Image (spheres, rainbow, N blue to C red):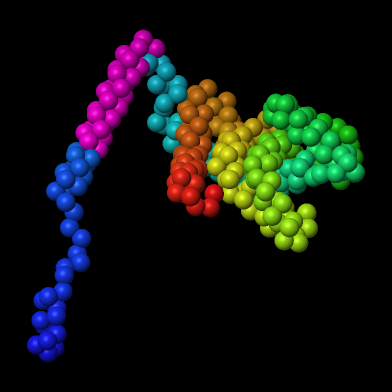
Amino acid sequence: MTTSDLAKEAAAPDDTYTPSARRLARERHRRSRTRRATAVAALSTAATLAVLYVVVTRSPGWPRTKETFFSAEYARRALPLVLDGLWLNLRLLVVCGAVALALGMLLALARTVRGPALFPLRALATAYVDFFRGLPLIICLLAVIFGLPALRLQGVPTDPVVLGGIALVLTYSAYLAEVFRAGIESVHPAQRAAARSLGLSSAQTMRFVVLPQAVRRVVPPLLNDLVSLQKDTGLVSIAGAVDAVYAAQILAGKTFNYTPYVVAGLVFVVLTIPMTRFTDWVTARMNRRQSQGGTV
């Protein structure tokens, strides 16, 4: 490096950003407030848990309740059986969730098609959604599990797992159809008009313009419905399918101890929490992008 280069480098201004003293003070104040809020939240949570622990453990019936519902011995015996049954719940979640999503999308498209000639399709889709959204899931399960085999029709399945899955799909496809329909109707009509002005057909407009925006907007409620489906897969046990709930019921019926039910419930909670947190993360991410003017 020559002498002239060294002189130019020495004369060049320093472009490194240096925050002002006021900015540094604000950042220190913000960090201190965050630490104080975290400490207060931790202390209040610990105090609340301590009070609940004292109230529960000092109650007159706690020894009997602990023995009946929170036995470590029965929990160790129940956990392997519950985990074996949980594999059935996971398979039902994957298969029924995929089929319900596809059927829900078809129902939503049927409810949003236009034209007087397609009115029967819209009416049938509306009747389907209204009926299965209003019908309690437990009644739908009982009707499908015990009603379909009673018809003795050729090709009707008799496997309780398959019949329970059919009932879950019938109910949740109706819920998911309304979620998809809300997303489709949330897309501004100007989007359709612009697409049609560019020469796209109605089907192309729905496929390439409306549906991508609609699906992105309804991802959080879709995930919430899948979380509910994951819990409701345990209801197939009423048909005799040995899932996590029925495995706990078998052991509880043999021992007259209800700790297996608690184990099964905790297993479902542990399985649900990651899906719930993922739903919260997706919702917060979409809210941030929307507030910053990004693509929803």
Is residue 40 part of the magenta span, yes or no?
yes
Q: Position of residue 112 (x, y in %)?
A: 76, 42
Is residue 263 part of the magenta span, yes or no?
no
Q: Is residue 257 visible?
A: yes
Residue found at x 28% / y 30%: 41
Q: Where is residue 72 in the image (x, y as percent from the top left)?
A: 39, 31
When asked about the image quadrant of residue 252, the answer is: top right
Left or right side of 24 for 100: right
Q: In this view, does 51 lie above or below 77?
A: above
The magenta stretch spans which residues?
33-61
Q: In front: 233, or 183?
A: 183
Residue found at x 85% / y 41%: 121
Q: In this view, does 91 lie above or below 256?
A: below
Residue found at x 40% / y 21%: 66
Check the picture and name the quadrant holding the N terminus. Answer: bottom left
Q: Where is residue 19 in the image (x, y as percent from the top left)?
A: 18, 54
Q: In front: 10, or 228?
A: 10
